[in-house]
């Protein structure tokens, strides 16, 4: 049995329910890769390991100099994510990344081509109402995805925590099954998590 998160909206209030029990082992890849090989899934990726000694985690800097960036282990970890996707023959339809340099670099090193999605920006760097609006956009994107391959979203621990109520480590991933049938739906299942060591 898998851990299943479902969300409904009553007015402006989000109600989350947890169904079933978690039998998947954190870090075990069988369910994770099998789900992606089916296609039609969404993967949340927390950016790879960063240098915590320098840079501002909240800042956006087009030069990346003043931001908190990947360290060497993080760069190797991001590359390994891409290697594992290719080794398992995973079809990727699209890669979207937060505008922070650490997420863009994770996406670039893992997958090559990607697009920046402003709504994936670190929610703690935003006013509360903007953060809530961005999370709503992300929930709908996940719920409505219906591609033959898989959608990759590279973002941050606080964002992922608000989406699936799980605390992912740097470079860790969660695969979700979209369940939306209406444009306003924000319903999806958490199938499995998988962590890539640097």
Image (tube, grey):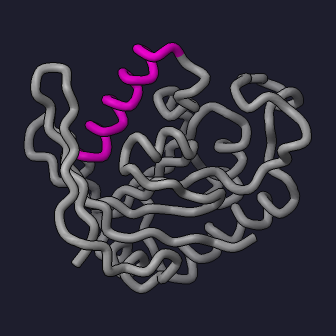
x then y, percent, for residue 80: 69, 71
Q: Is the N terminus in the top left, top right, bottom left or bottom right quadrant?
A: bottom left
Depth check, front residue: 44 or 160 = 160
In the image, 70: left or right of 165?
right
Q: Quadrant of residue 98?
A: top right
Foreground residue among 58 and 103: 58
| Residue in the image at 46% along x and 46% along y | 160
Between residue 4 and residue 150, name the one nearer to us. Answer: 4
In the figure, 137 relative to 22: above or below? above
Write the start and end of the magenta stretch as one range.
127-144
**Which residue occupies 66% across, 42% down?**
104
Please tell me which residue is depicted at 16% across the width and 53% down the height of the picture.
Answer: 179
Image spot of residue 5 (x, y percent): 24, 55
Side (left or right) of 141 relative to 127: left
Residue 98 located left or right of residue 92: right
Q: Is residue 159 magenta?
A: no
- Provide residue 147's location: percent of width, then percent of height: 28, 56
Q: Quadrant of residue 68?
A: top right
Prevailing secondary structure of the magenta residues = helix
The tally of labels here is: 0
Location of the C terminus by quadrant is bottom right
State whether residue 27 is above or below residue 155. below
Q: Nearer the viewer, residue 175 or 84?
A: 175
Residue that lies at the very extreme toward the bottom in this rendered image: 30
Q: Find out whether residue 134 is within the magenta segment.
A: yes
Residue at point 33%, 30% (across, down) = 137
Indicate the position of residue 91 as horizontal and vertical percent values. 42, 68
């Amino acid at each position: 049995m898998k851990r299943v998160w479902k969300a409904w909206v009553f007015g402006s209030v989000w109600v989350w329910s947890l169904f079933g029990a978690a039998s998947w082992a954190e870090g075990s890849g069988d369910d994770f890769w099998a789900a992606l090989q089916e296609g039609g899934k969404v993967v949340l990726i927390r950016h790879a390991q960063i240098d915590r000694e320098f840079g501002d985690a909240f800042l956006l800097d087009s030069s990346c100099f003043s931001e908190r960036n990947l360290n060497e282990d993080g760069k190797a970890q991001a590359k390994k994510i891409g290697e594992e996707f290719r080794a398992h023959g995973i079809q990727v339809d699209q890669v979207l990344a937060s505008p922070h340099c650490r997420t863009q670099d994770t996406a670039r090193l893992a997958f090559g081509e990607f697009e920046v999605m402003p709504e994936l920006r670190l929610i703690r760097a935003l006013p509360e109402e903007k953060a809530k609006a961005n999370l709503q956009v992300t929930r709908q994107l996940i719920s409505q995805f219906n591609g033959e391959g898989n959608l990759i979203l590279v973002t941050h621990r606080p964002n992922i925590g608000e989406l699936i109520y799980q605390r992912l480590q740097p470079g860790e991933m969660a695969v979700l099954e979209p369940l939306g049938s209406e444009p306003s739906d924000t319903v999806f299942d958490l199938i499995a998590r998988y962590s890539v060591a640097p």
